[in-house]
Image (cartoon, rainbow, N blue to C red):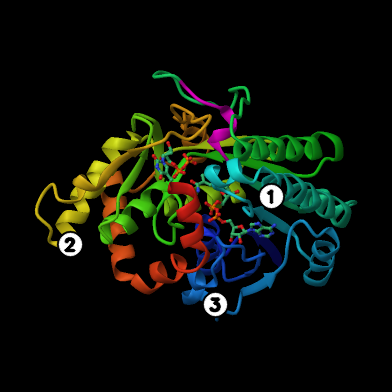
Amino acid sequence: MSNILITGGAGFIGSHVVRRMVKNYPNYNIYNLDKLTYAGNLENLKDIENEQNYHFLKADIQNAEEIDQIFKKYHITHVIHLAAESHVDRSISNPIEFVMTNVVGTVNLLNVAKNNWSGDLNNHKFYHVSTDEVYGALGSEGFFTEETSYDPHSPYSASKASSDHFVRAYYDTFGLQVLISNCSNNYGSHHFPEKLIPLCIHNIKNNLPLPIYGDGKYTRDWLFVEDHARAIDVIFHKGNIGETYNIGGFNEWQNIDLVKLLCEIMDDKLGRPEGNSEKLITFVKDRPGHDLRYAIDASKIEKELGWRPSVTFEEGLEKTVDWFLSNEDWLNNVTSGSYKDYYQKQYN
Ligand code: NAD
Ligand code: TYD
């Protein structure tokens, strides 16, 4: 019996991974460990919360003792680690929290896994989910491969880079059976509206300004979150131990073009005249240390594991908009309370 600990399962990507694993693998026990920070939301998993193979554990990965007790009590055999502080802008205003969760929290997990699995390392796996932002920024050409040197610029990407290095160190030094993936920007349902796409959906819906940092020419490679969850499933089951896999959408967009496309889709869905929402676009002060362009070369995972994105950007964006428009309560709940304070501080 596999007892799989998924950390950060109440967050955006984690909830999609948990849902997929619970549904597709009824013979696995899935333990969703989450601290439920502002970004964690059990509403994200309402549809599967009563499944027999699903269990929720509220805990903080910064607390090594608590994590150790969980490993012992539930005989954890595998880890898929997604818990993190994940927003670049928040890492600029509060870098220490990022070090504590992303670095110290990850090392705690690695250490507890090593100690509990020692003597039988080959029957256990530790899969660390990371970001393409560890590679730094590209100019107008080229792609990040698995061999690209790390060059993080924000406190967020520096903390994720550090955690990746620790995961490799536990493989090299202790023989912990690890896997790492570095993925590009995700979008889809249950995305917290501090990130560009859900923030713009929320603001278009409410006729609020759409804040575009700098000149809007910054470029990201967007991947539908369910395709990321499928890639994680494939790597977890078939990936070669000790290896890194880049995951990307083959789908680069400058922020300004993406927001214009979103405005077009929203005008159509909301029955507004063409061009209406675009008027909300507002250029604002740039993000410090803003990375110009991210683009992933995902040929390794395609060639070795047969994974490719299955959803086009137009399909994925439309599905995403439909989800947000038909889940008003979810959006209202996450944008009340502390979100208002965050928004005020960030954009005023
Ligand atoms: P998210 O912010 O939506 O969710 C993070 C989850 O981790 C939340 O449920 C939160 O409660 C939990 N968490 C935070 N601190 C914790 C702690 N100390 N202990 C236990 N749980 C804690 O993040 P996301 O966008 O779903 O990202 C998930 C992972 O994927 C992260 O590791 C991130 O670096 C990585 N990633 C994200 C993207 C993206 O586009 N969002 C792209 C590539 C990689
Ligand atoms: P974001 O969704 O925060 O993801 P990341 O910083 O991890 O790539 O931002 C995506 C892009 O959109 C990035 O270039 C910053 C930009 N952006 C804005 O222009 N305005 C905003 O309000 C936000 C949140 C992001």
Three-letter amino acid code at the position of disc 2: Leu
Q: Secondary structure at mark 1?
A: helix
Q: Are the residues at dot 1 and dot 2 in contact (C-beta closer than 8 Å)?
A: no
Q: Are the residues at dot 3 and dot 2 in contact (C-beta closer than 8 Å)?
A: no
Q: Earlier in the sequence, mark 3 or mark 1?
A: 3
Q: Secondary structure at mark 2?
A: helix
Q: Residue furthest front?
A: 348
Residue in view at x 30 percent, y 70 percent? 326
Distance, label 3 to label 1, CA atoms, is: 29 Å
| In-front residue for pair 347/116 | 347
Q: Which portion, as a residue range, is magenta?
A: 130-138
Residue 135 magenta: yes
Q: Secondary structure at mark 3?
A: loop
Circle 2 residues within 10 Å: few <14, some 14–19, many ≥20: few
* Image spot of residue 274 (x, y percent): 10, 50
Distance, label 3 to label 2, CA atoms, is: 32 Å
The residue carrying mark 2 is 270
Three-letter amino acid code at the position of disc 1: Glu
* Image spot of residue 20 (x, y percent): 50, 62
The residue carrying mark 1 is 97
Task: Give the side of residue 118 with respect to residue 165, left or right.
Answer: right
| In-front residue for pair 233/98 | 98
Cβ of mark 1 under 8 Å from ligand 1: the answer is no
Q: Which mark is residue 49?
A: 3
